[in-house]
Amino acid sequence: MADEIRRNMALFPIGIVMKLTDLTARQIRYYEQHELIVPARTNGNQRLFSFNDVERLLEIKSLIEKGVNIAGIKQVMNPVSKESEEATVITEQTESKRREMSDTQLHRLLKQQLLEKRPGKASMIQGQLSRFYSNKP
């Protein structure tokens, strides 16, 4: 199943993203306003975030901690539009898969993504998420 799921598939509600990134809902919405992330929306207007969104949020958090302001972050990180390849998407197929996934399956998928090595790109998400998995099955 992991092969079928792309990194920009909408999976995580804002509550989980808050726990994974240690950001507040207000901070996450602020970065969305500035088009640094583009989470997908359900029919009920709930935000759903992808692996790419979580990774971008962790990069933004790291830059903020280094003293970079939003204008600087926008220069370092290209804004994401809803039509770009990096935008989080919801399709009928991905939405049905997301609904079928149990919390355990989602946890395993997150762990697999955490351990995945992508050539040429060190993932900040790996260090941040490792604490999330330390006590989980």
Image (cartoon, helix red, strand yellow):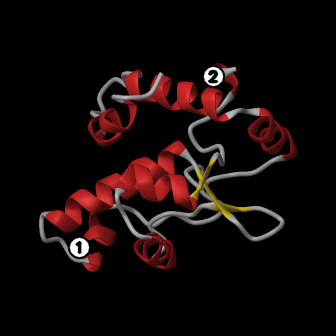
Identify which residue is drawn at 64% across, 45% down. 11
Residue placed farthest to the left in the image?
66
- Does 4 sit above or below residue 48? above
Question: Can you tell which quarter of the image residue 120 is in?
Answer: top left
Mark 2: secondary structure = helix
What amino acid type is highlighted by mark number 2? Ala
Q: Name the residue nearer the viewer: 3 or 43.
A: 43
Q: Which residue is mark 2?
A: 2
Q: 109 left or right of 134?
A: right
Q: Toward the viewer: 80 or 135?
A: 135
Secondary structure state at the residue bearing disc 1? helix
Q: Residues within 10 Å of mark 1 (few under 14, many from 20)?
A: few
Q: Amino acid at mark 1?
A: Gly
Residue 66 placed where, x, y %? Answer: 12, 64
Q: Picture coordinates of residue 97 (x, y %)?
A: 79, 35
Q: What residue is disc 1 on?
A: 72
Tell me if 131 is positioned left or right of 85 in this view: left
Q: Residue at x 70, y 66 (%)?
A: 46
Q: Earlier in the sequence, mark 2 or mark 1?
A: 2
Q: Position of residue 41 (x, y in %)?
A: 72, 64
Residue under the point 28% across and 79% down? 71
Q: Nearer the viewer, mark 2 or mark 1?
A: 2
Q: Position of residue 136 (x, y in %)?
A: 44, 28
Question: Label for residue 95?
Answer: none
Residue at (48% x, 21% y) in the render:
137
